[in-house]
Every structure is written in structure tokens, then in C-alpha cells.
Amino acid sequence: MNPLLPFALLLLAACAAPSAGLAGKWRVQEAGSAAVAGRITIEFQQDGLFVADGGCNHASG
């Protein structure tokens, strides 16, 4: 079996699934930040806001 087959099937399933928005009520349970290799960071602030930065993609709320 090709080692890429499970990954390809997972990718197809993920692309076929309907996208869901992030709308709704969110509550920060723990303030702090995390970083992943490749300059991706997410920070949860004490005031309940968040900041996510993924290189050219930026989200906050």
C-alpha cells in the first residue's frame, strides 16, 4: 500500500466536509500563548480576546 494513501483519503474527506464558521460565544479559560514551528502563534488574553498569526494570515477577536 502506498504510504501516502491514508493522507490522501484524509485530505479528500476534509475537503468534502462542509466548512463551519467560528461564530458564537467563546470564553477564554486560560490566558497565555503558544507557538508552532513556522511562525504560527496564538495568544489568549486576560480580557477574553485572542490574537492568531500565521505568517500572512492574521485573526483577532
Image (spheres, rainbow, N blue to C red):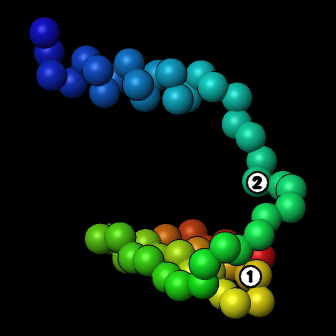
Q: Does dot 2 land on a helix, a strand or a loop?
A: loop
Residue at 49% x, 82% y is 33
The mark that comes first in sequence, 1 or 2, is 2
Q: In this orientation, which residue lies closer to the viewer: 12 or 36?
A: 36
Q: Is residue 35 visible to us here?
A: yes
Looking at the image, residue 38 sits to the left or right of residue 10; the answer is left
- Tag 1 near tag 2, CB within 8 Å: no
Residue at 74% x, 40% y is 20
Q: In this orientation, which residue lies closer to the viewer: 29 or 54?
A: 29
Horizontal and vertical percent position of residue 25: 86, 61
Q: Amino acid at mark 2?
A: Leu
Q: Amino acid at mark 1?
A: Leu
Q: Does dot 1 land on a helix, a strand or a loop?
A: loop
Residue at 29% x, 20% y is 6
User: Considering only vertical position in the picture, is 32 above or below 5?
Assistant: below
User: Considering only vertical position in the picture, is 28 above or below 22?
Assistant: below
| Residue where numbered disc 2 is placed | 22
Query: Residue 57, labelled with which disc?
Result: none
User: For mark 1, does the 10 Å Cα neighbourhood hold few (<14), some (14 to 19), or many (20 or more) residues?
Assistant: some
Looking at the image, residue 24 sits to the left or right of residue 47; the answer is right
Horizontal and vertical percent position of residue 14: 52, 29
Marks 1 and 2 sit apart, C-alpha to C-alpha, by: 14 Å
Looking at the image, residue 16 sits to the left or right of residue 50; the answer is left
Q: In this orientation, which residue lies closer to the viewer: 24 or 3?
A: 24
Q: Is residue 56 visible to us here?
A: no
Horizontal and vertical percent position of residue 47: 77, 89
In the rendered image, the quadrant that contains the N terminus is top left
In the rendered image, the quadrant that contains the C terminus is bottom right
Horizontal and vertical percent position of residue 55: 46, 74
Looking at the image, residue 51 sits to the left or right of residue 49; the answer is left
| Residue where numbered disc 1 is placed | 49
Q: In this orientation, which residue lies closer to the viewer: 29 or 55?
A: 29
